Image (cartoon, rainbow, N blue to C red):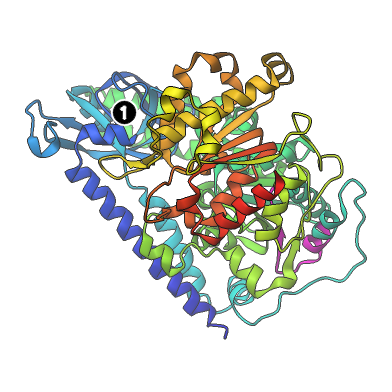
Amino acid sequence: MIQSPILILQKQKELLQQEYAYEKEQFQRQTETVGVTRKVKRGVCWYPLRTGRSYYNSLNQLVIEVERTENLDTDHSFEPGKPVCFFTQDASGDSRRGGDGFLHYLPFTASVSYVDENRMVVALPSSEALAQLSEADRLGVQLYLDETTYRLMFEALDRVIQARAGRLAELRDVFHGTAAPGKFAFAPVRFPWLNATQQDAVNEVLRAKDVAVVHGPPGTGKTTTLVEAIYETLRRESQVMVCAQSNMAVDWIAEQLTDRGVAVLRIGNPTRITDQMLSFTYERRFENHPQYTQLWAIRKAIRDLYAARSNGHQNRDAFHQKVARLRDRATEIEIAIQQDLFADARVIACTLTGSANRVLEGMKFSTLFIDEAAQALEAACWIAIRKAGRVILAGDHQQLPPTLKSPEAQHGGLDRTLMQSIVENKPGCVSLLEVQYRMNDRIMQFSSEWFYEGRLKSAPEIRYRGILDWDNPMEWIDTADETDIQVYLPDEEQAALNFGEESYEDGASRFNRQEAQLTLNVLKQYFIRIGKTRILGERIDTGIISPYKGQVQLLRHLLKQDAFFKPFRPLISVNTVDGFQGQERDVILISMVRSNSEGRIGFLSDLRRMNVAITRARMKLIILGDSHTLGRQPFYRRLLQYVRQQE
């Protein structure tokens, strides 16, 4: 039974409110009850902080440089564009805060403009905020709740729920109702450089009147297909919008388009954009416009007038007249530059929330392309869809879902994406890409059978790819089986085997000490078999994946300490499953961590994450895990059986 589209969206809004309330409560609890020391360990806070120079950047924002002076090796979650708040700490200790003094939050929020390991540039809301920072002692900074994104999603949902007529209402009823998506009828266009399923997908995009979905499993050339679809659409339309959930995904597809000679205008915070795309950003293009020098001079003149006024050297009426004239002229120049930039662009590229940028206000696009659509909340998609005549979604709902924090919202279905709904309700709109170009066929086969109804095929040129002759492309090192692990452990370690999982005190993550060491031992022996000369000469790269941040941190620490890996460190990446999304390596090792007598596996039960993990490997996949714990779940039991059958 198909529900009313409005009821479906109202349910989405309720679940989003749950997620917002949960995140807000978590933030307040963290702010009010968690001490600075634990915040620093969690990577959400820098303390103590040293302030540096302040200045106006190219976006006319007042920014200040800050630097952390302790805990320099601790991973952090600060990213450009994220909101932050500053605090000072009392000198006196407080046992309820683990010895930390009381915190006093400064009465403003700011945003990260640039960040590296230990230095950050923060955009401030006003000169008053700068003055408060200059006077503060024992200063720190922590992440703040990002309420802007929630506001945009709620506004978008309200708009589409309330739509009674027009294109937005039509798309809503096609996506969630009984209305059939329309198609144009024309003979297929041939693209000899694409495979058959890729050609079909491009043609389905061109035929779609309302919606089309390009379903791209790992390694099937989704981006290649989407770029071709965009390129062909631009033969028929003057301008399109291309969005994705993350800046990284937007930049990746924008780079492919610029390589094809397409004029791209990238909208978004320049500090969150890759170096390759910086010259295509709205801000850089704005700065390079012939009229920008005049605009900068006017802005400086306005600041100088305010500075002179604060010194008491200005008549009040004359001051207001001068400022008004200068601002009017600045606005004229800004509008003229903006019109030139948008007139020259064929593709407007931004994140889904970035589509609400003020420079895009009032703009409409015949076609909206949303890449990585299976990772985006439906509410976020509607922010961009409000500007569109038709929608093309690309992604894979069998890989990473949207990131949620509220278990209740997730269980209620907030992680069910718009792409997933359309795939299930309107299968005629979906084109599955079936030929993969990444993995050895035996690595690919399990994923194909479990997630894609066995429809994937390996391209002939990569079907048997491998590193060593007679090597097994897949291995499972079972930490519950001594015969599996004894070859990898020194005699002194075999006497006290304990592969039990552990948790951090605050329960933030899990780790498994002996499994982490075993992971590096396994990799070490595999590297010895390949040979140092060949690894470095052929640049054979390796990824070590764990679903848990705690294990990732432990693995990075052990890797840094082990002198054997020093020559290979540039070729080795250690990260979570989410951190490896969209990437691939010649060799992948997965440390599963979970090992307990109750068979609890936590969020390893989200099988889409494991699909991502096992499909990162081109030639060699090694899984390390406890079969007694994991094997109680049908997916992992079948995976272990599959690997054993390959031996």
Q: In this picture, which residue range is highlighted in magenta? A: 202-218
In the rendered image, residue 207, in percent from the top left (x then y), is placed at 81, 66
Image-based side of 29 in relation to 262, left or right: left
> What's the residue type where badge 1 is placed?
Tyr
**Residue at point 63%, 75% (across, down):** 170
In the rendered image, residue 568, in percent from the top left (x then y), is placed at 59, 18
User: Is 210 contained in the magenta span?
Assistant: yes
Count residues near mark 1 (Cα–Cα under 10 Å), then give few for <14, some for 14-19, many for 20+: some
**Residue at point 93%, 49% (across, down):** 192
Position of residue 270 relative to residue 22, above or below, is above
Where does the C terminus fall, quadrant-wise? top right
In the rendered image, residue 304, in percent from the top left (x then y), is placed at 36, 23
Position of residue 246 relative to residue 213, above or below, is above
Residue named by callout 1: 306
Q: What secondary structure is found at the residue carrying circle 1? A: helix
Position of residue 411 relative to residue 583, above or below, is below
**Residue at point 52%, 48% (across, down):** 354
In the rendered image, residue 485, in percent from the top left (x then y), is placed at 52, 34
